[in-house]
Image: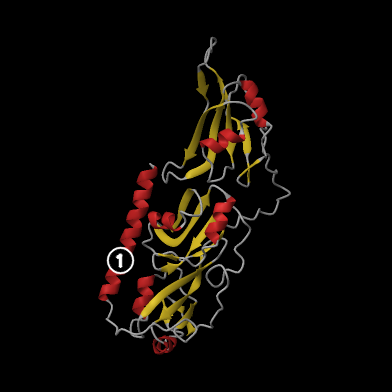
Amino acid sequence: KEKKEKKEKKEKKEKKAKAEEAAEEAAPATSAATPAAEGEGGRVFLGNLPWSVTDEQIKEVFAKCGEITKIEWLTHADSGKFKGAGFLQFASAAAADAATKLNGNDLDGRAMKVEIATAKKERAGGAAGNSDPGEPSNSIFLGNLAWNIEEETVRAAFKDCGAISRIKWVEKDGEFRGIAFIDFESVEAATKAVALNGVDLGGRPARINFSKPREPRPADPNKPQRTYKPQKEKPEGCVELFIGNLPWSIDDDKITNFFKSAGTVTNVRWLNDRETQEFKGVGFVTFSSTEEVDKAVELAGESIDGRQIRIDYAGQKKEGNGGGNAWQKKW
């Protein structure tokens, strides 16, 4: 299933990349020019853009102005959502000046803001605009990715940082949004990756910072507060627990190690969404005895990779009078 999911995502990216290539081939040819350095007038800021804007659409809009050598979209550091703005690097200052003449022109119902960009000083450690990489964690955010970026390219770029446990491509309505999240097996590995902010990935300078954890919602005084321990009576002979609020980086080894003080984990099952096959952040853990379950419950509320684990009884009961080692599940 995982291979099938990766294949589908790859096909979507390739489809979008082909569309871009077709648009570029159909665009009027421009004369070769020596690229203008950023800060010399060749860089243009775009604002008030529609959320659906694409590289090929922008290239078509500014085709008569001159050659565009780089497109950089701006996204929010915490969520990766598009800000509706970006920068264009033209091959010459004259082309950038011509682009500003389109200031106020309509693009899908929005009046574009087009102006010469104010030069921004590059900060140490990566691309401009990333002075605060966020609080260190084992997860990082990748922005400004090419639409046709491949997983192999990303893994190769970070191979010297440390082991990657998961890559999540962000899509909307089935379309890749040019952003992703990577979980490393250690904070040290993620820190090395963040130091590569601005590295070229597929022809674009990648924006890299630590993933910002979701801020907790304000407590509702009228709503019962979440509890991490079971709130119902333990079924007789229960040897299986429901585990919730798990991090995306969880795996069999991590959960087994988490419960090693309670006893022996004999089986682990993770739950995925039936349609998307995305991990739902929950699972079931089976122990070798009901006494070990009692010890495991005491670990409710403890954290794995920054998330407090919720534990409940899975609701197993013996089958028939003789029972033995046969079990029947209620779900």
The residue drawn where x is 52% and y is 65% is 197
Quickly name the residue at label 1: 19
Residue in the image at 45% along x and 82% along y: 37
Looking at the rendered structure, the kind of residue marked 1 is Ala
Query: In the image shown, does 53 or 210 lie closer to the viewer?
Result: 210
Q: Reply above or below: 75 against 266.
A: below
In the image, taking residue 54 as reference, residue 28 lies left or right, namely left
Q: Quadrant of the N terminus?
A: top left
Local crowd at mark 1 within 10 Å, few (<14), some, or many (≥20)?
Answer: few
Q: Is residue 126 above or below residue 316?
A: below
Residue 231 x, y percent position in the rendering: 67, 32
- Relative side of 225 to 84, left or right: right
Vertical relation: 156 (above or below) 26: above
Please provide percent x and percent y for residue 96.
Answer: 42, 86
User: Residue 154's image quarter?
Assistant: bottom left
x then y, percent, for residue 38: 47, 81
